[in-house]
Image: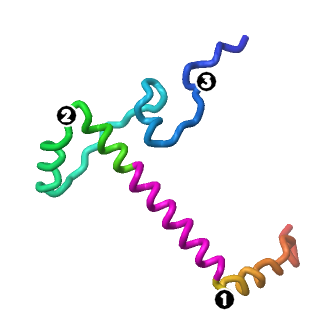
Amino acid sequence: MRHPASRQDMIVPRPPTLAFWYYGIMAMRKMTFSVPEPLAAQLLRRVASRDRSRFVSEAVAARLEERDLALIRACEIANQDLDVAEIEKEFDGIGDEMAEPWK
C-alpha cells in the first residue's frame, strides 16, 4: 500500500530564492563563514537578527544565478566563434564505435 504523498512531494517548483522560505520545503544547514569586519558590521546594523539567514541566503542565491548567467553568456560567445565551430565539426566526425573492440 502506497503512503499518501508527503508535503514535499506535492510542492510546485519555485524560483530558488523563494523556495528557501516556505516551511518544510527545503532542509536547512547551519554554516559558518568568515567575512571582513566592516561587512559584518553593516549586516548587523542594517538587517534585523530574525532576517539575517534569509538575507544571506537570498544574496548567495542571487550571486550564484549571476554566475550561471555569466557562464551561459560565455558559452554563447564561444559558440559563435568560427574556430570553435571548426573544432566541433571535427569532433562530430568521430564515430561512437571503436575500430577494434576489446574482448
Mark-to-mark CA distance, 3 and 2: 31 Å
Residue 79: say if magenta. Answer: yes
Read off the residue under disc 1.
83
In the image, residue 86 lies at what x, y percent? 73, 87
Q: Which mark is residue 49?
A: 2
In the image, residue 87 lies at what x, y percent? 71, 85
Q: Amino acid at mark 1?
A: Asp
In the image, residue 53 lies at what x, y percent? 29, 38
How many other residues sit within 10 Å of disc 3, few (<14), some (14-19) or many (≥20)?
A: few
Magenta highlight: main SS? helix
Residue found 20% across the figure and 54% down from its top: 35
Relative to 25, is 48 on the left or the right?
Answer: left
Read off the residue under disc 3.
10
Mark-to-mark CA distance, 3 and 1: 47 Å
Asked if 38 appears above or below 98 in the picture, the reply is above
Asked if 56 appears above or below 94 in the picture, the reply is above
Pointer 2 or 1: first along the chain: 2
What element does badge 3 sit on? helix
Residue found 68% across the figure and 87% down from its top: 82
Mark-to-mark CA distance, 2 and 1: 53 Å
Q: Check if mark 3's residue and mark 1's residue have beta carbons within 8 Å.
A: no
Q: Which residues are magenta?
A: 61-80
Residue found 83% across the figure and 81% down from its top: 93
Give residue 10's quadrant in the image.
top right
In the image, residue 38 lies at what x, y percent? 12, 56
